[in-house]
Image (cartoon, grey):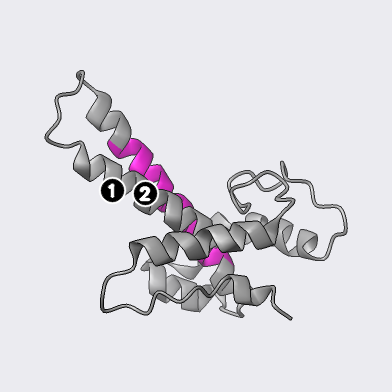
Amino acid sequence: MALAVAGRDAADFARNFTRDVPTSHPTGERIRNARRLRMLSLVVLDRTVLLELLEGADWQELSDALGIPAEEVERRYRHTWEVWKSNLAADDLDPNLFGDHTTGLPHDPDPMGTAETIDAWLFRHAEPWEDPQPNFRSHFDA
């Protein structure tokens, strides 16, 4: 869900960034907004790498996908991955431990609500040819 939240945030920011391009801005504001969009996209990338690791990818597979040496991938992500893994099973998660690697809501007290929010966002933004059926909430329907 952390990846979906990051993707939603980046997409919303990108939409507003694109819409505001023809609008007059003080010098430097567009650059600051472009830097913010870049940072949001890097959060999406980082969370995607964590999800790939969670699903069993190894450093070489990530290297192939990222286009950088496996040693560099491991250097960049090993510590975050170890912290993430060790706390997946913890009963008392520290939301400050992960920094950007959270669901986007500090110590999310309502993951079902977050899932429903993402599903509603997907439904609102679905193209006519896409199947807009919610799917994150289904992870909690058991």
Question: Can residue 107 be spotted in the picture?
Answer: yes
Question: Vertically, is 138 above or below 107?
Answer: below
Q: Which mark is residue 3?
A: none
Q: Which residue is mark 1?
A: 15
Q: Residue at x 24, y 23 (%)?
A: 28
Position in image of residue 98 (x %, y %) = 67, 48
- Residue 45 in the figure: left or right of residue 85: left
- Residue 4 in the figure: left or right of residue 66: right
Q: Residue at x 59, y 48 (%)?
A: 104
Q: Amino acid at mark 2?
A: Asp
Question: Vertically, is 137 above or below 142?
Answer: above
Which of the two residues, 13 or 91, is positioned nearer the viewer here?
13
Q: Quadrant of the N terminus?
A: bottom right
Q: Is residue 132 magenta?
A: no
Secondary element at image label 1:
helix
Position in image of residue 121 (x %, y %) = 44, 59
Pointers 2 and 1 in contact (C-beta within 8 Å): yes
- Residue 66 in the figure: left or right of residue 70: left
